Amino acid sequence: MQLSQRIVVVDDERSVRSGLTNLLQSEGYLTQDFESAESLLLDEAAMANAALFIIDVQLKGMNGFELFINLTRRLKNPPGIIISGNGDENMLRYAINLGAIAFLPKPIEIDALFEHIRDEFASRGARQ
């Protein structure tokens, strides 16, 4: 089953990017992945077609928080899940205050990730 929601993954670690996209695709989601914030910001179609963003904090160049702020300026309430291999409570609060739907530490708890994705898509469906 192919779901119409496209999830964009931004992480500079190839293994994380491919692991997340393979996992999401195995659940039927369309995906697109980027190794940097800058490469995503150059792709207007990817931003416009994204139903959800999964963004790592520690990126080369622009960091994940800066990317999410940039997305909120370009898109109306972009749903984002922020991930980090070395996050703390301050990062969690900052991510939520920016409007992210979740902040997940790496290694990512897969059940929690899919719960956040399903909740976001269900609530969006109820709003439409």
Image (cartoon, rainbow, N blue to C red):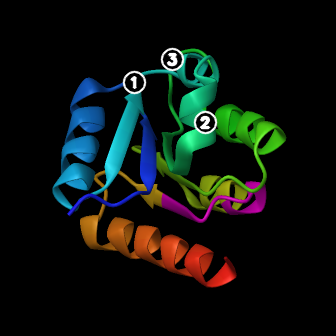
77 over 66 or under it: above or below:
below
Mark positioned earlier in the residue sequence (2 or 1): 1
Mark positioned earlier in the residue sequence (1 or 3): 1
**Residue hosting label 3:** 60
Q: CA distance from mark 1 to mark 3?
A: 7 Å
Mark positioned earlier in the residue sequence (3 or 2): 2
Q: Is residue 35 left or right of residue 64?
A: left
Badge nearest the viewer, 2 or 1: 2
Quadrant of the snapshot with the N terminus = bottom left
Residue 52 makes an appearance in the image: yes
Q: Residue at x 66, y 55 (%)?
A: 95
| Label 1 crowd bin: few (<14), some (14–19), many (20+), radius 10 Å | many
**Residue hosting label 1:** 12
The quadrant where residue 112 appears = bottom left
Kind of residue indicated by mark 3: Lys
Q: Residue furthest bottom?
A: 126
Q: Of residues 20 and 128, which is closer to you in this image? A: 128
Dot 2 lies on which element? helix
Find out whether the residues at labels 3 and 2 contact each other: C-beta distance under 8 Å.
no
30 over 103 or under it: above or below:
above
Kind of residue indicated by mark 1: Asp
Kind of residue indicated by mark 2: Met
Q: CA distance from mark 2 to mark 1?
A: 18 Å
Quadrant of the snapshot with the C terminus = bottom right
**Residue hosting label 2:** 47
Report x, y in % for residue 24: 27, 53
Q: CA distance from mark 3 to mark 2?
A: 19 Å
71 over 61 or under it: above or below:
below
Find out whether the residues at labels 1 and 3 contact each other: C-beta distance under 8 Å.
yes
Q: Is residue 110 left or right of residue 78?
A: left
